[in-house]
Amino acid sequence: MYKFPKIIWLASILLVFISCSYNERPSSSVQARSYDYEEKDNFSALVDPASDRFIIPPEVAVMSGKMTSSSSSFDKTSKLLATGAKEFLSNVNSIENCSAKITDYRHPAVNKSSKVSLSNKNRYLGNLKLEILISFAKTQDINQRIQQLNSCLQAIPQLKVEQDESDKNARIDLFLSQVMPTIKQASKYRKELLEFKFKSLKEVGSISNPATQFNASDTKCTSKGIVQVVNRSLSGIELDVDFDCRRFVNEKLIIEKE
């Protein structure tokens, strides 16, 4: 009788063992995973609610768009853009607290891209840029802002090109960006931000019976007043202002050792 070599026999036993072990594993798709194996910015999307932050409700949301058209002639390409823009502006501006405008225009020109086939080398391509502004002035919370946002977005038309036997490849396209919640003027919050920054220093300085080596009065702070948006969402806009504090003892700057 033919006998398997010893190494083949051992390999067969090992494969059977692995197969049985695999079948005993649970079929659930939920698996435990240590954070040690995650990326370093594992919590970058989370904001610690215990941190001191200056947050205000968003006042508006901004969205950009680009409308492109192409055809075999200058006139038709420009007409497609004019018709598409008119429909777009009319629909969006008809919704309360929604507005749209043209911000830039590139007149039709012959497309000289190397990717265009020889039969289409004289096609004209043009585009215009759009801006949509959504006001949250009449909203009180994130749910109302979502409703206002959806009302504006649902008004954006689906642009179509009328059939033309002389130019079956004529087309018009609309590309839209993500929505950006923001405020109209960040600088108007400068005073509140600086008072917000100084509040903690005042509390430190007003501690009763501080230790003799503890002296908050030797700290001097200054600011250029540059207000920036550091985080944004439909629930709130987080602002910050540059704030540079140094310690002085006997009019000499104290360099903190790291």
Image (cartoon, rainbow, N blue to C red):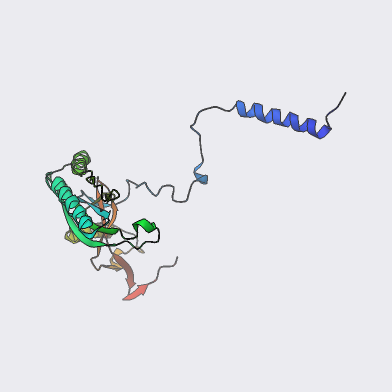
Camera-side residue of 48 and 143 = 143
Q: Looking at the rendering, which quadrant does residue 81 occupy? A: bottom left
Q: Is residue 133 visible?
A: no
Name the outermost residue toward the top: 1
Q: Is residue 93 visible?
A: yes
The image shows residue 51 at horizontal and vertical percentages of: 32, 50
The image shows residue 111 at horizontal and vertical percentages of: 32, 61
Q: Is residue 206 above or below residue 57?
A: below
Q: Residue sitting at 61 percent across and 26 percent down? A: 23
Camera-side residue of 188 and 246 = 188
36 sits left or right of 223 in the view: right
Q: Is residue 184 above or below residue 162?
A: below
Total number of numbered discs in the rendering: 0
Camera-side residue of 144 and 224 = 144
Quadrant location, the C terminus: bottom left
Name the outermost residue toward the bottom: 251
The image shows residue 114 at horizontal and vertical percentages of: 40, 61
Q: Looking at the rendering, which quadrant does residue 244 occupy? A: bottom left
The image shows residue 22 at horizontal and vertical percentages of: 62, 29
Quadrant location, the N terminus: top right
20 sits left or right of 113 in the view: right
Q: Looking at the rendering, which quadrant does residue 243 occupy? A: bottom left
Name the outermost residue toward the right: 1
